[in-house]
Amino acid sequence: MKVIIALVVLVVIGATLWLSNQGRVENPVSQTQELPVISRQQILTATDLVEGVKQGLQQDDDQAIDTWMSKAASVAREANIAKEDIDYIKSDAALDYVIFQAKRSQFNDAVEQAYYELKGIDAIKAAYPQAKDLYASADKLIAERDTLIEQIATEIADGNTPTNAERQSARQQWLKRYNEKQSQ
């Protein structure tokens, strides 16, 4: 009987030790190794980097673009990210990626301006093939704008089918609101 009790006690102690170790997670990173505070992707998509490169593109200033990419590499070194990631940030592939993102941002800016200025976006789409996946949403935005203007024209026409003059008046109201927004 004493042997059975001793075996049960050993099993209980073993089970308790085993279960208590299940909650512990081994730290895969050694205590001396620091994790970077920022990733390569975060650096390459940072708003200030994309805006700086976008401005360099607008001014056709390759030196400004190179300066921004050097700043990105400097941030990567300061953040102590992996050497492979720093090398990538210095690469032509990273430059192409950032330029691609900057051109997509330029597309968005151009569509926004066309939206408020009551212009079409076909020429904008032709100028920015990098934003091909954004074309459908931009077309939808322009269609919604045109629907709003048509609703304004219908209100001016007191619910009747608007005339060209009423549509033109609605367009003028739209432009007036845009100009007021710009002056603020």
Image (cartoon, grey):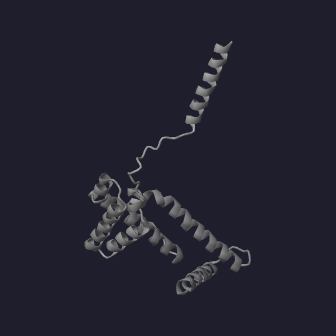
Q: Residue at x 58, y 70 (%)?
A: 145
Identify which residue, 8 or 137, lies in the foreground.
Answer: 8
User: Where does the image place residue 121, in percent across and percent down from the top left?
Assistant: 46, 68
| Residue appearing at x 58%, y 31% in the figure | 17
- In the figure, residue 146 lies in which quadrant? bottom right
Whether residue 62 sits left or right of residue 165 in the image: it is left
Q: In this view, which residue lies farthest toward the right?
A: 158
In the picture, measured across the screen, residue 62 lies left or right of residue 148, that is left
Left or right: residue 2 compared with residue 109:
right
Specify the farthest residue to the front: 2
Q: How many marks?
A: 0
* Residue 173, x across and y down, in percent: 61, 82
- Image height of 137 relative to 159, above or below: above
Q: Nearer the viewer, residue 151 or 82?
A: 82
Which quadrant of the figure has residue 66? bottom left
Q: Position of residue 6 (x, y in %)?
A: 63, 19
Q: Nearer the viewer, residue 71 or 138?
A: 71
The one nearer the camera, 151 or 77, is 77
Query: Which quarter of the picture shows residue 12?
Result: top right
Q: Quadrant of the C terminus?
A: bottom right
Which quadrant, please, contains the N terminus? top right
| Residue 60: % across, % down | 29, 74
Vertical arrangement, residue 18 with respect to residue 158, above or below:
above
Name the residue: 42% across, 46% down.
29
Left or right of 61 in this view: 172:
right
